[in-house]
Image (cartoon, coloured by chain):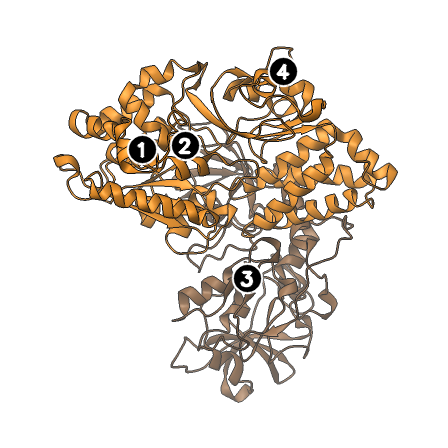
Amino acid sequence: MPLLKVTIDNIEVEVEAGTTIMNAARKIGGAVVPPAMCYYSKLEGSGGKCRTCLVKVAQGSAKDPRPMPKLVASCRTMVQDGMVVQNITSPEAMDSRQAITEFLLLNHPLDCPVCDQAGECHLQDLSYVHGLQETRTDEERRTFKPIDIGDKIKLNMNRCILCYRCVMVADQITDKRVHGILGRGDHSEISTHILKAVDNDFSGNMIDVCPVGALTDNTFRFKSRVWFTKPFDAHRECTKCSGKVVLWMKSNEVLRVTGRKDKYGEVEEFICNDCRFDYKELKDWTVEGPRTIERHSVISQNHYETVAGISVIAPK
Amino acid sequence: MATKILLNNIEVPGLADFQVYRKLGGYTAVEKALKTLTPDDVTEEVKKSGLKGRGGAGFPTGMKWSFIDKKSEKAKYLVCNYDESEPGTFKDRHIGQLNPHQLIEGMIVGSYALGATTAYIYIRGELFYVLRIIEKAIAEAYQNGFLGENILGSGYSLNLYCHPGAGAYICGEETALLESLEGKRGNPRIKPPFPAIVGLYGSPTVVNNVETIATLPWIVNNGGESYAAIGVGNSKGTKLISACGHINKPGIYEIELGLPVEEFIFSDEYCGGIRNGNKLKAVVAGGSSVPILPADLILKTAAGEPRLMSYESLAEGGFQTGTMLGSGGFIVMDHTACIVKNLLTFARFYRHESCGQCSPCREGTSWMEKILMRIEGGQGTMKDIDLLVDIAKHVEGNTICPLGDAAAWPVASAIRHFREEFEEHVKLQKCPF
């Protein structure tokens, strides 16, 4: 199969046929990668919903050089040979990204000071880069009461941006999905109908895939801000999953266990609920060493080796 | 006398009955197509006719059919989009209620052309009484050998099902319709792939509007060229217009495309003028989604030409001074109508009907409704008007399906043409009407 040549923000890259613009941009890396609030490469059929990754296609392909009439979702649009894409170089795409950020924040409670996700929240990152300085709305926001959607999972629907990732994770890695989207439009919500109905060995992954603080870990809630905890790669013998996790520690105390996330916030491997919720002692784990957080976000501040690719540890 | 294709025999009592319809020359198109024409011949006639999709988008039907991969080993489907729920549009209901056999005949001819052996009519949940009429008609067609195995001994078989939706406007979007038909939540799919490649159950599928399909028997009987002889420019044939609002004779009219708008509104044959001799203020020409036009621009184009009821003439001037034929929901407003209130009604509808899948539409529609509610309620500010324009601009074109556009266009056009009225609401701090 010959490789396809794509130009994204004047950088040329060669990718296989069937690659999306998003993944071609990720191959280049850095600033040209569009933000993704709903796309998750490990989940089939994800993406296309949040519209934050809209980009301009200035040239459709070498064969048909016409530009595409509308901005396209880079996570769901396949590249063509000779395609020219403008992401950060397109004022139109930047303008719409700012508008989408505003839309996503419209009903968001902006309760970052009390939200457990703060510091590793994709919506926070997005609004730092693309948000407006001031809010243009004083309309009443939609509100819901926080509920326990599963034994150890808290759902705060106010913060949800309806990315459908948790629905897909339940569809694709568990036997039976018991939660979903109820209702329609701005009054739609994630729910189970019955409290604490989500009960399976991999339900905790809903927390890992959630880009915002809508789904949080009850065993970690309000224990610490994430930037005060230090991440360590660790593993254990597990019969249900790979057992490869990240321990979030404060001194010798394990406060939280999550999957190992890459710089796009996607877990390398889904882990089981036993590893996530039940083994909170250091003796349960074989610690491999400190984890490097490559994501450009608050959690990569303070005590990590690199921030956005720049070494922050002074050379000896 | 204008040619009538869809409403020709509509006043004959008992037309929904098979025998009555048959006596009036019904099902001759099926006989002609199955006995004398190949599927490609039928497609060719439809292409020649220049028939455009009557659901709103106006995409040429013959071209839509030609996207189907005929060589595919998968089953092919023809789906009739009977989810008519656009505010102001009530033409399709009429066909199914009074003349269901013409729709069924169209379905048979269309399915034959596409090589489909299973076809569906997806009907809106609120039209349950129409569903019963259609189901009875389908049963009659089965009894008389026009549906089922080996129709008229031609070797062609077709099963036709009528499936009710649950009353969601979004299921009128073709991919949401297919999702709903498959038994899933009615969320529009992300395109491409288009239904002609991956449609119902992953198979090549054509989704056509009721009116489009009901026109097919006439085209097969009389030939595509005689259909193309009706109309003006690229707007061929006849179109059902459901006229409502402040007119003397609201109702469903079949017009030959190219009729002057002025004649349609004021002649006694059609709308019969504005009620109580009032002054015409504005018209929404093609269902709630299309831009609203003030009286002077709907009667004459910006260039001073008389405006005609055709795809091209109504669209002349782009969205700055033009609009669209859309689905034919013709809403007329006289000088007593409040544009802001009317727009609020539309905005509330789109907010309620947005599926909530993609963020610009989900959040934008509700934001616009909230602002309009404030302006109409006397608590708006001048800033709100510009904010509305800005929101509409950013919803339009950024969504998965056209519902976002449909919600944004009325807002943008109402402010474009009637800005003073919005400002008056703000200045008076109340609705002046």
Q: Amino acid at mark 2?
A: Glu
Q: Which mark is residue B106?
A: 1
Q: Colour of chain A?
A: brown
- Residue B273, picture quadrant: top right
Q: Which residue is mark 3?
A: A265
Q: Amino acid at mark 3?
A: Gly
Q: Which residue is mark 2?
A: B211
User: Separation of disc 3 and disc 4 at Cα?
Assistant: 54 Å
User: Separation of disc 2 and disc 1 at Cα?
Assistant: 9 Å
Asked if marks 2 and 3 touch (Cβ < 8 Å), the reply is: no
Which of the marked residues, 4 or 1, is nearer the chain's N terminus? 1
Q: Amino acid at mark 1?
A: Gly
Tell me the residue at 37%/35% (across/down).
Answer: B99
Label 3 chain ID: A
Q: Nearer the viewer, mark 2 or mark 4?
A: 2
Q: Secondary structure at mark 2?
A: helix
Q: Which residue is mark 4?
A: B301
Residue A62 in the figure: left or right of residue B420: left
Above or below, A25 against B50 in this view is: below
Q: Secondary structure at mark 3?
A: loop
Q: Colour of chain B?
A: orange
Label 2 chain ID: B
